Amino acid sequence: MIVVVVGRQPARYQETAPDVDLRFVDRLDDAADVFGEMEAVIGRVPPDVLAKAPRLRWVHSPSAGVDADLTSEMLASPVVLTSSAGNGGISLAEHSILLMLMLDRDVPRWMRAQADRRWDHYRHGELAGRTLGIYGLGNSGIDLAQKAKAFHMRVLGVRRRPEQPSPYVDQVCGLDEMLAESDFVVVTAPRTPSTAGVFDRDAFARMKETAYFICISRGGIADDDALLEALRSGQIAGAGLDAHGVEPLPADSPFWSLPNVIVTPHNGATSHGTARRGEEIVLENLRRFVAGESLHNVVDKAAGY
């Protein structure tokens, strides 16, 4: 059995699968000599390589979101795709709380005052008693709900399968109800055909004028033109954007200079903890694959996650 491991250090993989022919490469192309024999790849597999790998049975994506992995060729393939879902949930939830606090307390105003050595004392908001709406109740959404309860917030949520348990969420509801009642709307859902463009002009029009929009999962779930219009017109109070429709965010993007927007460079989950959890997920799946056991985080290709 040949397993190609892309961009990772050998030691723990060799300990996990000592009897497997593990090929460690910096780039998948460096393993071209075994494309016809490899049975698993830990890393992304582009369509041209998929076509050259008749024995391939399993691909593990290094990301929690697999929109980049789900090419038409992968969708049509019997290859099992697993993800690193859950690796960044804690960190993304923390980043959401950070953006909520920064927006509600207008932290950029304090930073400008500090740069000017100016004492700027003003009245600001607090999260207690406010309503948080979470679009997507997966790992990061549920962790955010738990953290929000520690801030004494009411939590609403929207999810594809509302019958599933949603701890720390006061009410699972429809999108319209969530938008109308929320003071903060946080997008934690993956980008799929059913979520792309959900936050359009009509969606932003249903939000409170005092509400903030935050996106920490994937760009493209919000229509950028509609979001810009809502921010410029005062339809919503502001936005915290870690995930963007185009990445890196172009230097001429108007999001950079809007006074009611905080931009971070899709950096919310880039923590040591995320890396550690991601490594544990893939190592456990490698152990399971070798042992012939069912894998964790198997992607529903039709659903997109």
Image: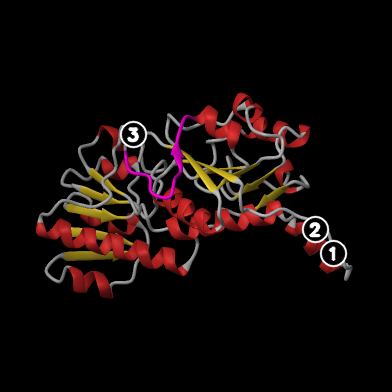
In space, the residues marked 2 and 1 are separated at their CA atoms by 6 Å
For residue 169, above or below residue 17? above
Measured as percent of width and height from the top left, residue 177 is found at 53, 30
Residue 7 showing in the rendered view: no
Helix, strand or loop at label 2? It is helix
Q: Residue furthest top?
A: 202
Residue at 35%, 54% (x, y): give it.
84
- Left or right: where 166 falls relative to 291: right
Residue 297 showing in the rendered view: yes
Does the magenta stretch mainly form a helix, a strand or a loop? loop
* Amino acid type indicated by mark 3: Ala
For residue 59, above or below residue 283? above
Sooner in the amino-acid sequence: mark 2 or mark 3: 2
Magenta stretch: give its range.
164-174
> Can you identify the residue that label 2 sits on?
109
In space, the residues marked 2 and 3 are separated at their CA atoms by 42 Å
Sooner in the amino-acid sequence: mark 1 or mark 3: 1
- Left or right: where 109 falls relative to 170: right
> Can you identify the residue that label 3 sits on?
303
> Can you identify the residue that label 1 sits on?
113
For residue 189, above or below residue 180? below
Residue 171, quarter of picture: top left
In space, the residues marked 1 and 3 are separated at their CA atoms by 47 Å
Which quarter of the image is occupied by the N terminus? bottom left
